[in-house]
Image (tube, rainbow, N blue to C red):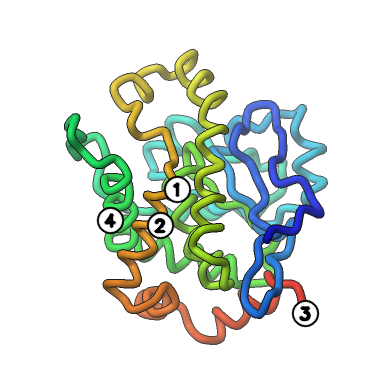
Amino acid sequence: MVDESYSRNLPFSKAYNFRDVGGYTGLDGRTVRWRRLFRADSLHRLGEQDAEAFAALGVRTVIDLRRPHEVEKFGRVAEEHGADYRNLVLRHVDWEEVGHPEDTVHERWLADRYLNFAEDGHEALLESLRVIANPAAAPVVVHCMAGKDRTGTVCALALSLLGVGDEEIAADYALTTEAMRPLTEYLLRTSPESILGNEHMFDSPPEAMLMFLADLRAIHGSVEGYAKQIGLTDDEIAAMRAHLLNPI
């Protein structure tokens, strides 16, 4: 069940995958609060025409998961938007170096990439969850380049810690597939080398997220167990739930 009190998708001129992760049912039937946690593709494209709409969201903190060369090449969210900018680099194996032969089970390939995030990128995942858990940092926007994989992993972990079910988490992740259409069209015009030959990197089948969450539990016992293993404390988990879940 999803509370639809607010619009999930937030239109900006050149941010194609900006949306709210509120409204999902979490622990004890409490819903995730709207307008506290957002996910997005890269915010370097937000222009002057987006300033008023972005300001209306009251964003205090931007978590940018991209690597230094991505930030250097494309830029970051403009300082004039006034958000506390955190470049929490999520380390991972370079996807271009991982084969994707024709007989690959695509969902399995993606889930394995997300498991690699959980291993090599655990420091950024921990710091991201800590920021999200801090009520003074909210509202928070988490983003990477497309807002799909690195961002999707952070949001999946946060939603799971809030008690949202795997099916809803996977459905939220899958919403990115539709957003990829205008984004890939934009990239084909402006940076075709990022698309051509990498088409398999731009969809979001829900099965991939379901596999990832199941694998994480198989390895660590639970998503909460993984979060604690990488360093998230009971107090931080409690704080996350206290400010991101509506009271009963």
Q: How much space separates mark 4 and mark 1, taking CA atoms?
A: 18 Å
Residue 113 pos. (x, y %): 29, 49
Identify the residue position indicated by label 4 in the image.
Answer: 116
Residues tagged 1 and 2 counted as in contact (Cβ below 8 A): yes
**Which of the two discs, 3 and 1, labels the residue nearer the N terminus?**
1
Above or below 27: residue 104? above
Instruction: In this rendered view, identify the residue nearer to me: 193 or 80.
Output: 193
Residue 226 pos. (x, y %): 37, 74
Q: Regarding mark 2 in the picture, which secondary structure is present there?
A: helix
Instruction: In this rendered view, identify the residue nearer to me: 88 or 215.
Output: 215
Q: Regarding mark 3 in the picture, which secondary structure is present there?
A: loop
The kind of residue tagged 2 is Leu
Residue mark closest to the camera, 4 vs 3? 3
Above or below 41: residue 151? below
The kind of residue tagged 3 is Ile
Image quarter of the C terminus: bottom right
Identify the residue position indicated by label 3 in the image.
Answer: 248
Q: How much space separates mark 2 and mark 4, taking CA atoms?
A: 15 Å
The kind of residue tagged 1 is Pro
